[in-house]
Image (cartoon, helix red, strand yellow):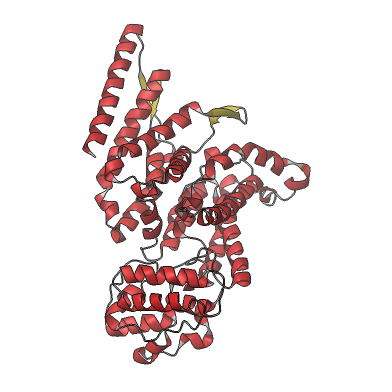
Amino acid sequence: MLWSFVTTGAVLLAWSGVLLASALRKRRVLRLDIMLRPQHYVQACAHTAIFLYWGWYWRPVYESAHLIIAQLFFAYAFDMLLTWSRRDTYTLGFGPFPIVLSTNLFLWFKEDWFYLQFLMIALGFAAKEFIRWTKDGRETHIFNPSSFTLTVFSLALILSGASDITWGKDIAITQFYPPHMYLFLFLVALPGQFLFGVTTMTVAAVLTTYLFGLMYYAIAGTYYFFDSYIPIAVFLGMHLLFTDPSTAPRTELGRMMFGVLYGLSTITLYALLRVAGLPAFYDKLLQVPLLNLLIQSIDRAARSEPLRRFDPALIGRSLSVRGRNLAYISVWAIVFAVMTAAQGVGDRHPGQWIPFWQRACEQDRNDACRYLAVLYTNYCRAGSGWSCNELIRLQAAPTRDQTPATFPPLEELPILLRGSKGPITDRSAASLYRRACEQGWPESCSRSGKSDPASSDSDARP
């Protein structure tokens, strides 16, 4: 860690000296313009809110705050030096904030490898500066800077088998620890959706993934992503990763197609990564640069004669841009409310809980016994002796009756009942038995005073 900072600082200092000498020799005047763009500071506020809320329930976020601040200082210095090395005027604003914060929402390198974090940030700014094209008569960068660098480094980590030098898996898991995290992400993304018109991308991506999950459940009897219809990190990516308006299609229909492609590519990448035995948390990161390359083709298709009649922008021609954005947000709010009521998003997805997978394994549903073994293994490692015993029973008879031999002891329930959420804080017997009953453990219902929810099959609703 120390050498990462010392070396990075030395490189910036040397670059500054070379630039200063060159400017003096050529009599260049280096200027600084200040421009505060809403798309930068609104996104920065959304990202910061997520870090604050997430960090309250997973303390390594707060413990890493100084490292994120250091990356921001580095980003400003690198961007400024790169710009002044090519032209005389640097525009100072909040531009580095969304690049740095978005990158850190998905991938951190561990301390011994932290110099790679600085390289990630540098690559994002370099890609923004050098990889450009002409779009709608204006030269602009092709790739979302944070998405581009995340993809490049994700591919390098996959090819080198070095994913364990990052906190990527932990990030994807712990972002679900805070209560009502789906609702929180929905709310913090609303200002950006209203101002920049990216709602249709998010809605298309979310609905595509959710409807696929419903179809998969109807066919297989289990959940495609196991403990959710849309993993929380994927849901975050659908709001604040691929939705950069500068690297997205211009037409509303094109943005909907863009969202559908993001949802379908996430589903496909998840399957491919699992088949290859690779970490699945890369499923939301690898495809964005390719989608960025397709945006002009997507817009041409959306403007073509067969498709332009379906452009939702035609419905609200009389509305202002902000009026249409508000209409799209209203539709999205209704869709989100319906999905929440149907347990499509939220904290209570049945796939988090052991009883669902026990019954699914007993019925020999797709991948159910394998995932039940994963749950038992994780809980065994967390200190549940009951899970260790159940794992042995499952390995001995993987497709037979998976009804547990005994109900777990009370002291192990905080381990077994947390699902994919953070640690359980209320550990009173009454609360634990009530929670167990709600999750589908019939033996606990009489102890909590509740009726058995399994009798109404409430834990197996799609």
Image-based side of 423 in relation to 367, left or right: left
Where in the figure is residue 294, as x and y percent of width and height? 62, 39
- The front one of 350 and 326 is 350
Q: Quadrant of residue 76?
A: top left
Give whichever of 32, 404 is nearer the camera: 404
Near-viewer residue (382 or 329): 382
Q: Is residue 166 visible?
A: no
Estimate the x, y position of residue 12 in percent, counting from the top left.
Answer: 29, 26
Q: Residue furthest front?
A: 396
Q: Position of residue 338 (x, y in %)?
A: 55, 68
Asked which quadrant contains residue 428, the reply is bottom left
As drawn, the residue found furthest toward the right would be: 305
Q: Quadrant of the C terminus?
A: bottom right
From this viewpoint, is residue 97 visible? yes
Q: Position of residue 449 (x, y in %)?
A: 37, 91
Left or right of 109 on screen, residue 234: right
Which quarter of the rendering shows the N terminus?
top left
Q: Is residue 387 above or below residue 192?
A: below
Q: In the rendered view, tell whether residue 454 sits above or below residue 41.
A: below
Relative to 401, say whether 234 is above or below: above
Identity of the residue drawn at 23% across and 34% down = 3
| Side (left or right) of 40 relative to 20 | right
- Number of numbered callouts drawn: 0
